[in-house]
Each structure stands twice: as C-alpha cells, then as structure tokens.
Image (cartoon, rainbow, N blue to C red):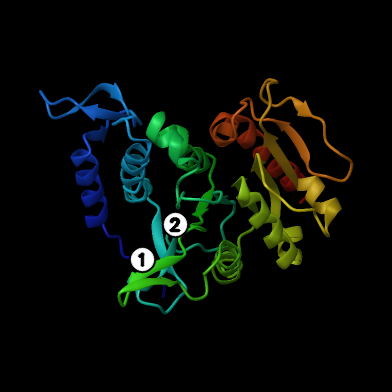
Amino acid sequence: MPDTNLPTANCEEAITKLRNFGYAFDDTGVLRKIDPATGEPGNDQFSYNVSNDATENEKHYQKLADQIPEIVYALLEKEGLRRTYIPFGQPPEQSSFIYSLPAKLSKSKKLLVLIHGSGQVKAGQWARSLIINNSLDHGTQLPYVRQARKLGYDVLITNTNDLKRFFDGKDNPIKGVETPTQHTKYVWKNIVIPSNPESVAIVAHSYGGFLTMDLAEQFVDFFKEKVFAIALTDAVMGTIQSNKEYISEVACDWVTSKTPLGTAVLTTKGSIRKISAGHTKHEWTSYSAIDSIFKYIENKYEKRSNKK
C-alpha cells in the first residue's frame, strides 16, 4: 500500500520563513507585508524591489517563492486531498508524490486530473507569480478542486516538476520519475488505470498540454474509452501524431486573447479547437477560464452519459 503520511512541520517552517521575510497570507489568501505594530498581515502587498541591486531583488523573490510549495501542499490537505508517494516502494524522503481525493482512488464515477506547466511550480499551483502578486485563488488549483468536488468529481493532482531529492550529500534524480513525462506516465500506469475510473477529464496548463498529448499517445485505448474531456489552458504542444479525430473531439484550448472569454479563435484545420481564455497573459489563463472550462467539461460529460 503506498505511503500516505502527511508532514505538517514543513508547512509551519515555510510560514515561519515567510514571516521572517516580513510577509504572511491574509484571510483572503493575499500575500501581505506584516504590520510591525500588530504582527499581522497589513494592507501592503508584495514588493519585488527591496534594494537597488537587481540581483538582490531576484534572490529575495526566489527565497520567498521557495516557501510557496509547502504552504500550498498544506492547503490541499485542508481540502481533504492526501499524498501518495511515487514510485512505490521507495522511502518517502527519496520519493516524489501526487495528491488525490480520496486518498486511494477506486472506480471513480468522474475523475478530474490536473496537470500544471513546466518551471518552478509544484503540485497545486498554476502560476507562482499570481500566488505572490495576486492571491492563492489566482495562482493555485484550489478553485478547481473546490468546483470539482461540488460537481461530484474525485481529483488527482500531478507534481511533474518534483524530480529530485537531496540525500547522501547531493541532489539525486528520483528514479522512475526523473522527468515530467516519466512522472505522468508512472501516475497513469500505476494509479489512474488500476483505479478503473468510469470517466476521466483532464485540465492541463502550458507544458501540461504536451504531457497530456504524450499520455494520449501512450495509452490510446484507455483515453478513447475513458477520457471524455481535455481542457487545455494556453497549451504548449507538439504536432498531434495520431488519434487526431478523437483528440479534436474531446480537446479544447483556452488561449490568450483580447476577445471575450469563450470566443472562438482562428484554428488551423486538423488542430485542437481554440477559444479565448478571456485574458492576454499566459499565466492568467487557467484562472480566467475556469467557469468556461467547467461548463465545457460538464457538457462533454452529459453527452457521454446520453450516449451510454
């Protein structure tokens, strides 16, 4: 049975470090400067420029940003999600992990899989910059989790940039999940498929689109039978090599655009349908398109149910 222990000490340490930088999240999830008089979050939000030295500013930002993953993990756990360490059979301190609700997925009537993009983001995040400069709801996957639960979905959250662990005096790749593609393939082969869900929807941002298309190539029969909706947000993808008819039927990409949310965007023949995410900035697309995405997924599910 996979390990599903829940470390909380790391989150408390991250919150303390954040306070040492002079910041804390307020009750609405906005990162605020701590008011020296009260010791509580005040009115001022994050400020990138802490000195006249550009290198110093970036160092400060990165150190602060390093505390975000553990805080988001704790918030996922508050929502009821539990972590499963991968690959199976490894000590937790030498493993990566994913989150799911319930902890052990089994025969989900509806399963929603969330796949973030490349870079520094970890499980539960869409855009670190939005978490820091706007709010937790803007930059995390928490609104997707809450909406999915309201609509009766089980949830699985990938962690495709969590690829190394420090032990034996050095950073070591996590064997079996050393790359984002290996991570998603392992999760699909060892968790999603064995859980035997009735139906699956995927939301994937940026490079998560590439990972999703890779899965669709690797697990053709499962996708055609089970995956009824693929919602992409400003996806990075290669050319669709096979299953073009199936992919064009189930997938839609919410892209940056000056046009209103949901407006059709010019799409080349044979490619995935594109519609406006209602925002002109790449990192905002998942947040700005959420209502349109869930409407799309639910419509696809209704069609699937009617066919059955």
Q: Residue at x 56, y 51 (%)?
A: 115
Q: Amino acid at mark 1?
A: Thr
The residue pinned by badge 2 equals 99
Measured as percent of width and height from the top left, residue 24 is found at 25, 35
Measured as percent of width and height from the top left, residue 85 is found at 41, 68
Q: Is residue 218 left or right of residue 39?
A: right
Mark 2 or 1, nearer chain start: 1
Q: Residue at x 53, y 45 (%)?
A: 152
Q: Which mark is residue 4?
A: 1
Q: Is residue 91 left or right of residue 269?
A: left
Which of the pair 28/31 is nearer the observer?
A: 31
Q: Is residue 286 left or right of residue 272?
A: left
Residue 120 vertical position relative to residue 257 in the rendered view, above or below: below
Which of the pair 249/218 is nearer the observer?
A: 218
Residue 287 vertical position relative to residue 59 in the rendered view, above or below: above
Q: Residue at x 66, y 50 (%)?
A: 209
Tell me the crowding category of disc 1: few under 14, some 14 to 19, or many 20 or more residues within 10 angstroms, Cα based. Answer: some
Q: Is residue 98 left or right of residue 230?
A: left
Which of the pair 144/255 is nearer the observer?
A: 255
Can residue 92 be spotted in the picture?
no
Q: Residue at x 79, y 43 (%)?
A: 272
Which of the pair 40/129 is nearer the observer?
A: 129
Whole-number angstrom distance, CA of label 2 to CA of label 1: 9 Å
Measured as percent of width and height from the top left, residue 299 is found at 70, 37
Q: Amino acid at mark 2?
A: Tyr
Residue 112 vertical position relative to residue 219 in the rendered view, above or below: above
Can residue 23 be spotted in the picture?
yes
